[in-house]
Amino acid sequence: MRFARTSKLIGLAAAAALALSACGGGGGTEGGEGNAAAVITANSTEPQNPLIPTNTNEVGGGRVVDLLFEGLISYDAEGKPVNEMAESIETEDSKTYTIKLKADQTFTNGEPVTANSFVDAWNYGAAAENAQLGQYFFESIAGYDEVSAEGSTQTEMSGLKVVDDLTFTAELAQPESDWPLRLGYTAFSPLPKVAFEDMEAFGNNPVGNGPYMLAGEDAWQHDVQIALTPNPDYQGTRTPKNGGITFKFYSGFEAAYQDLLANNLDLLDTIPPSSLANFKTDLGEGRWLEKAYAGNQTITIPQYLDEWTGEAGELRRKAISMAINRDEITEVIFSGGRQPATEFTAPVLDGYDESIPGSEVLEYNPEEAKKLWEQAEEIDPWGDKTFTIASNADGGHKEWIEAVVNGLKNDLGIDAQFEPYATFAEVRTKITAKDMTGAFRTGWQADYPSLYNFLGPLFGTGAGSNDGEYSSEAFAKKLNEGLNAETPEEGNAIFNEAQEILLQDLPAIPLWYQVRQVGWSENVENVDTAWNGVPIYHNITGK
């Protein structure tokens, strides 16, 4: 949501509240103080890249970076912004923001967190020569276009100015009254001076300022685990109530679930599809929760592939979408634990509209799907090609992808197959390199509570998470109009007009909205998830 003009961030925190609802019994635990010395084990995946905030845009790395670094703000369990490093964020015109930092904040190597810690990190993230996946998040700042242009050697955005050790200003290219709400995303984290000496080496052994830090030099055992320990000098709102978090990497959720049942894993944030019908009984009362969050699941068909371009490509994407029986898949495979998508964002966000014009393309209609495919055949014959959907095989996606491809075979009469990759990092590396030969599973877990976060970073031209290389001038214009709106309601209405363009072009095919099913062992308590579906790790305690 947007902040009123001439505002202080905390003063309008309540304006960003989200109405989250539980989807069944269980809920988060509310035990006693618990054992604050217990080290909590939780599931995860091997991060795709070194742990650099501006280059981390996937869940495995993101959940670690979120705990190692603290930005200007954080978000509480309901999505409300809370000042962390920021003492205040003020503006007179929603274009130039003055940011004052709290005094006596440090990184874990003892270096003070200063205005330069933020300005240098943001400039690094925006500069073309650094090719950061989070580059797009700095697009609003004046001078971004110059430093981010391909081949540019400029390294500093003109809109960032250091005033003194604890103050800097950020001038935007245009007024954007909700810009402060984005500042809790990890790309806006500060970096210590040591990071700029060797960024890749730093990413493999990062020095942060968050509630946790790496538990020694061998804390990151690649493809095995990452061990975090509390940062004793942390002064923010996310103070750890446990003795550390160890993220264990699994080859699949089934193995993790068995470890959970055996109390060899304390927290599992995704129940495998094969256990969704029984996990509540398996775990018993007080050891599970089921809760909607700001996340979705999609299929991206890259537009850098010739067969998916032009009119024939558009017809084929619509045919694929209308040949997917979302109601049946969410009911049979997910035991009703997902909600079929009607657009590109998530129902828990303010401004969500389930009746956007064009949304009928997301309804199961095999007859119309077949008709659209045949129209594409008249323009550009498909021939004997196979339609593939790629995904990591270790993430519990095999069942639903196989259901989708079997439906495509039956309804469209084409050959369709699941293309498995051994790990999430492996498939993401190929996706990031724009080296895919077919469709692939995608999805989004919100970075901050806004409709725009599901649109700009994913479908904006050149955006770091625009996996399919979609580009539309009409869509970009609508996004810009929405960002410059005077009120949250006006902005959301314009963002939904932008979605009408997406429903026509289908740069990705929305499938369903995510619901977080979480289970935990008999050894822990005080478990809950936040507005974005992420477990609130720092609150978990041992028994």
Image: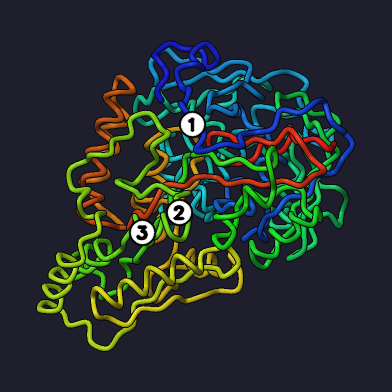
Name the residue furthest bottom. 384
Q: How far apart are marks 1 and 2 (CA)?
A: 21 Å
Q: Distance between the residues labelled 1 and 3?
A: 23 Å
> N-terminal of the two: label 1 or label 2?
1
Amino acid at the residue labelled 3: Glu
Number of the front mark, 1 or 2: 1
The residue located at (80%, 53%) in the rendering is: 263
Q: Nearer the viewer, residue 86 or 332?
A: 332
Q: Earlier in the sequence, mark 1 or mark 3?
A: 1
Residue holding disc 1: 21
Residue 136 x %, y %: 45, 46
Estimate how packed mark 1 is, as few (under 14), some (14 to 19) or many (20 or more) residues with alpha carbons within 10 Å. Answer: few
The front one of 324 and 160 is 324
Residue at screen point 68% across, 52% down = 282
Q: Horizontal and vertical percent for residue 366?
A: 21, 66
Residue 147 at least partly seen: no
Front of the two marks 2 and 3? 3
Q: Nearer the viewer, residue 448 or 183?
A: 448
Q: Can residue 211 be seen in this view?
A: yes
Amino acid beneath label 2:
Gly
Q: Mark 2 points at which residue?
A: 443
Q: What residue type is labelled 1?
A: Ser
Residue 161: name its quadrant: top right
Q: Indicate the position of residue 481 as horizontal and vertical percent values.
A: 26, 32
N-terminal of the pair, mark 2 or mark 3, is 3
Looking at the rendering, in which quadrant would you find the C terminus?
Answer: top right
Look at the numbered disc 2 and give the secondary structure of its residue.
strand
Residue position marked by numbered label 3 in the rendering: 328
Label 2 CA crowd tier, 10 Å (few <14, some 14–19, many 20+): many
